[in-house]
């Protein structure tokens, strides 16, 4: 059953009983189930999750890290992934047949990942091959569907993370003359620029119109950026930075590379979620920081560092809405479904797609080791 089909039925929807339970009762029940299932249960929690969920996480981290930790935990039969759909897919790809991956709310998707579907991508690839010949290698951000990871796998490409994007783009240029970077144009643009690719050597592929957006001689194109973005990180703006520079010139600004190029350029530093966490961790007490990333994480960083003055770069920022679909009621429901021996909200990638997607992940991991 596809996600759209699921949403048209009552199956997979939170039972009414969980909507009326008191928080304390839900928390107590989660603790009981965790104790009863013991090592057979593993709950990975992404950095962007709510505190009401993250308190029960057995591991906290980025999507690929959590998938790897899940796969390494061979005792865990049930992996209840508190993140979004593509993250749970990656966990299923890397785990073994004796492990089952669950997503507490099947509506927890990723708008960025959804901006590149496999049908659009195959159409684009056909056109680009006709235009440029066999000169392109595809790279996909791990924030993409299993189908897109599989596409890069079978076409000689690789996944990238925000931490290793630079090394993977450098590797890609040793393989082919051009790169197709999916699905986040901003991470692709920022990374390519950092290794010396001029902005006017980058084109944008528009999957809605099936056209290449570029002015100039297409022979100069080195990077083709998919027209996708993170709806959270696109909301950090040049105006946010200008206001902060005016009112708080002492404050350092650090942002995620999913932000627009002009925002990254005007910031003091940029890097992956882990990089941001580490920078703040190592910063001197009394220093002041504005952080351009997801609000749940920023609030957690603020709470963990009372010795520093920390704010969100955008004071009106909201948490990631799709990530926040995973909440305490859905977590408890997922756990009680497991306890009842029922099957629900299971994420399963078909064997062919998983095999090809793993090729893409393995190429990346081989470069990291």
Image: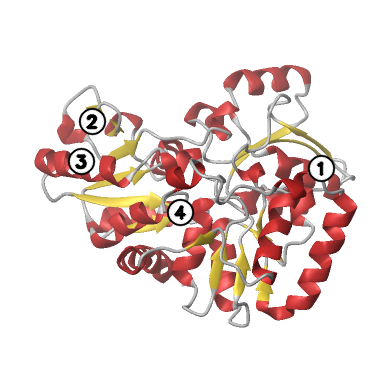
Asked which secondary structure carries label 2, the reply is loop
Say whether disc 3 or disc 1 marks the residue closer to the N-terminus.
3
Q: Would you call the spot at circle 4 few (<14 residues within 10 Å), some (14-19), or many (20 or more)?
A: many
Residue 123's tag is 3
Name the residue that disc number 4 marks. 142
Q: Would you call the spot at circle 3 few (<14 residues within 10 Å), some (14-19), or many (20 or more)?
A: few
Question: Quadrant location of residue 180?
Answer: top left
Name the residue that disc number 1 marks. 302
Name the residue that disc number 2 marks. 210
Note whether 38 is above or below 146 in the view shown: below
Residue 340: give x, y in percent of width and height.
Answer: 67, 70
Closest to the camera, between mark 4 and mark 2, is: 2
Tag 3 and tag 2, C-beta contact below 8 Å:
yes
Say whether disc 3 or disc 4 marks the residue closer to the N-terminus.
3
- Spatial CA distance of label 3 from label 4 is 21 Å
Residue 337: give x, y in percent of width and height.
Answer: 66, 64
Say whether disc 2 or disc 1 marks the residue closer to the N-terminus.
2
The residue drawn where x is 51% and y is 26% is: 262
- Spatial CA distance of label 4 from label 2 is 23 Å
The residue drawn where x is 82% and y is 48% is: 284
Asked which secondary structure carries label 3, the reply is helix
């Amino acid at each position: 059953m596809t996600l759209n089909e699921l949403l048209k039925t009552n199956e997979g929807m939170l039972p009414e009983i969980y909507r009326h339970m008191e928080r304390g009762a839900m928390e107590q029940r989660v603790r009981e189930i965790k104790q009863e299932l013991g090592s057979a249960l593993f709950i990975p929690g992404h950095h962007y999750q709510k505190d009401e969920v993250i308190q029960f996480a057995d591991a906290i981290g980025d999507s690929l890290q959590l998938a790897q930790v899940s796969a390494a935990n061979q005792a865990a039969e049930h992996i209840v992934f508190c993140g979004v759909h593509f993250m749970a897919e990656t966990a299923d790809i890397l785990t073994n047949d004796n492990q089952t991956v669950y997503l507490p709310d099947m509506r927890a998707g990723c708008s960025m990942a959804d901006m590149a579907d496999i049908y659009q991508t195959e159409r684009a690839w056909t056109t680009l091959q006709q235009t440029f010949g066999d000169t392109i290698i595809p790279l996909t951000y791990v924030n993409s569907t299993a189908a897109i990871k599989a596409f890069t796998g079978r076409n000689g490409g690789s996944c990238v993370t925000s931490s290793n994007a630079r090394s993977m783009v450098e590797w890609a240029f040793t393989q082919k003359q051009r790169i197709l970077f999916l699905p986040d144009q901003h991470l692709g643009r920022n990374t390519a620029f950092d290794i010396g690719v001029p902005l006017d050597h980058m084109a944008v592929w528009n999957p809605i119109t099936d056209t290449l957006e570029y002015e100039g001689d297409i022979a100069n194109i080195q990077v083709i950026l998919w027209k996708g973005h993170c709806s959270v990180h696109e909301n950090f703006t040049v105006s946010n930075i200008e206001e902060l520079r005016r009112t708080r010139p002492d404050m350092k600004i650090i942002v995620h590379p999913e932000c627009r190029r002009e925002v990254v350029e005007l910031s003091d530093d940029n890097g992956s979620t882990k990089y941001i966490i580490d920078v703040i961790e190592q910063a001197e007490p009394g220093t002041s920081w504005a952080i351009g990333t997801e609000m749940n994480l920023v609030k957690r960083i603020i709470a963990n560092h009372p010795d520093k003055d920390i704010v969100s770069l955008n004071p009106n920022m909201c948490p990631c809405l799709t990530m926040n679909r995973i909440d305490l009621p859905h977590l408890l429901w997922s756990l009680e479904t497991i306890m009842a021996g029922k099957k629900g909200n299971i994420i399963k990638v078909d064997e062919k797609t998983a095999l090809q997607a793993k090729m893409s992940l393995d190429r990346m991991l081989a470069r990291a080791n």
